[in-house]
Amino acid sequence: MNETIELIKRCSRISFQELPEAVISTAKYLLLDYLGVAIRGSRTESAKSAQSLAGRFHSTAADMTIIGTDIATDPLHAALANGIAAHSIECDDVVNEASLHPAVTVLTTALSAAALAGGCSGKDFIAAIVGGYETVIRLGVAVDPASHYARGFHPTATCGTFGSALTAACILRLDEERTGNALGIAGSQAAGSMEYLTDGVYTKRFHAGWASQSGLTAALLAAEGFTGPTTIIEGKFGFLNGYSDTPHPERLFSGWQNPYKIMKTSIKPHACCRYNQGPIDCLLNIIKDNQLAADDIQTATVGILSAGFPLVAEPVEKKRRPATIVDAQFSMPFGAAVAILFGNAALDRYTLKNLQSKKVKDLMARINCVRDPALDALYPAKWPASAEIVTHDGRKYTGKIEYPKGDPENPLSGEELKDKFISMVQPVLPLQQAEQVIQLVDDFDNLDDVRHLIKALALK
């Protein structure tokens, strides 16, 4: 089988009319979550650097808003800036089985492509992003996340480039031949090094922006007749063989549309790496159920999935002494400490003040991380977690969860999601404008032109 061509045929032929109502609702649910995260992310220093660059490239044709700002630029540079913003606060959606973040590439690209296409309806947008989610997630599963990470690749960046290209090709209405070229071109841009973990720099955030810009560039080049290999996924030097020691091409089409992969997407209630989310939920459940206070706790031990252990738990002394916000986002001890001290690990807990806090530092020294084979046995279909708290007076409490809050099996309610959106955008947009965005997303499948939403995302 030519997997590249087959994937394109299946994804590019997804039509809105054939989508189940649950898929349409989930697409809108994830869109609102993405917009809240991107708007708030626009205030980070990494996002401001990208905005400064993108602001130099203003054009009068097909201007695209840099979300949460008053900057209009060309859609390619907007994709770069918006992708960086959306991935910069570690609150973006995630798919457990693929261990990647789809929205920051697929939705970022979709908005820029809609600005270029002109007149893209909400229905066409939804169909395109469903195809984009299928592409990025199925590639993430097929490349084998554990092997991909072990070789130093970040799947949001690599697989995201392909999902971005497919999404853009659908919105720009490329035929299947040109879409094949777009994915072939995307494959020569798929990049994303995990070396950012060494010193807590911004390059992980760059991964989402680069994948978005690269996928859109690939589709635009293909539209102009530029060609790329249509065996880019399965070829001898293609993506699966080049980026993994244990590729599984058979997983690309396993269980097709049963369910659509977008239905397997989780969103984050905590502002940190997904591997931290379950353990934090466990700790908070134990504390709440047993009415514990931070001062009661002598030690806390959390069970971490082996796939995430090097990201959030090693080396232990560095994870207990995060030097930057990026370090903190990938530190299980920090996430556990602020959750215990403040009752949550929300975005406002990831601050330099808390990095320097004696209370936080003292508690981080008493957070232990362990691998748990019982958890690994369920991975990646589930991302379970465990925790144990020992109090100063010798009491011991334990807990486990199968599905962290935000997983499809344990989702945020519609009201919880809207509350998350409002809390995210409150420092950026006035309440009336935030409510306008919510209304546009609620009625998104009836929107005749996505540019109405894009306009509502600009800072007035």
Image: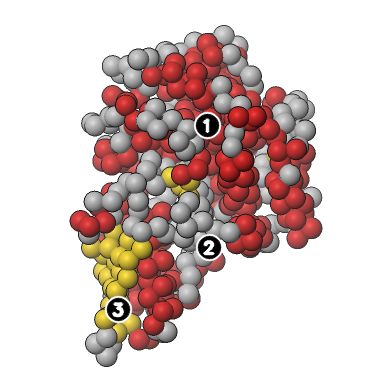
Mark 1 or 3, nearer chain start:
1
Q: Secondary structure at mark 1?
A: helix
| Residue hosting label 2 | 347
| Residue hosting label 1 | 132
Residue 184 position within the rendered picture, expressed as x and y whole percent measured from the top left: 45, 18
Residue at (40% x, 57% y) in the render: 403
Disc number placed over residue 397 in the picture, else none: 3
Mark 1 or 2, nearer chain start:
1
Label 3 sits on what residue type? Tyr
**Nearest the camera: 437 or 48?**
437
Q: Is residue 275 visible?
A: yes
Q: Secondary structure at mark 3?
A: strand
The image quadrant that residue 316 belongs to is bottom left
Residues under labels 1 and 2: Cα distance? 28 Å
Q: How many marks?
A: 3
Q: Are marks 3 and 2 in contact (CB under 8 Å)?
A: no
Label 1 sits on what residue type? Gly
Q: Is residue 331 visible?
A: no
Residue at (71% x, 48% y) in the render: 442
Q: Is residue 446 left or right of residue 298?
A: right
Q: Is residue 410 left or right of residue 71?
A: left
Residue 157 position within the rendered picture, expressed as x and y whole percent measured from the top left: 43, 36
Label 2 sits on what residue type? Leu
Residues under labels 3 and 2: Cα distance? 27 Å
